[in-house]
Amino acid sequence: MAKALLLSICISLIGFPLWVAKDPHPARGLKRALLAVVAFNFFYIIVLRVIVPRFG
């Protein structure tokens, strides 16, 4: 489980910029990338605080 959590960070750091790089407007692409990173971090905090402790 720990490897999957660490790997998800690496995938998000590479995946989000690749995903928003297709946007023709640089400012909007940057906003979408930042929003995606913030949303991922929020989800990651929930996973670490709620789900991981249940695995023991």
Image (spheres, rainbow, N blue to C red):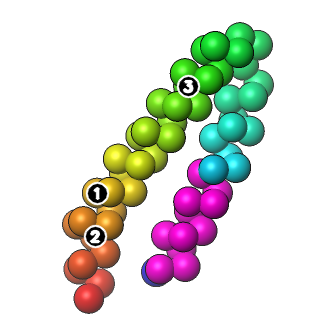
| Marking on residue 23 | none
Q: Which residue type does callout 1 highlight?
A: Ile
Q: Nearer the viewer, residue 42 or 51?
A: 42
Picture quarter containing residue 27? top right
Q: Which of the two discs, 2 and 3, sits closer to the camera?
A: 3
- Give residue 55's position: percent from left, percent from top: 29, 84
Magenta segment boundaries in residue numbering? 2-12
Secondary structure at badge 2 equals helix
Query: Earlier along the polypeptide chain: callout 1 or callout 3?
Result: 3
Quadrant where the C terminus lies?
bottom left
Labels 1 & 2 near each other (Cβ < 8 A): yes
Q: Which residue type does callout 3 highlight?
A: Arg
Query: Earlier along the polypeptide chain: callout 1 or callout 2?
Result: 1
Q: Which residue is mark 3?
A: 32
- Give residue 11's position: percent from left, percent from top: 64, 57
Labels 1 & 3 near each other (Cβ < 8 A): no
Picture quarter containing residue 38? top left
Q: Which residue is mark 1?
A: 46
State how far apart marks 2 and 3 are (Cα).
27 Å
Residue at 56 percent across and 62 percent down: it is 8
Q: Pointer 1: residues within 10 angstroms few (<14), some, or many (20+)?
A: few
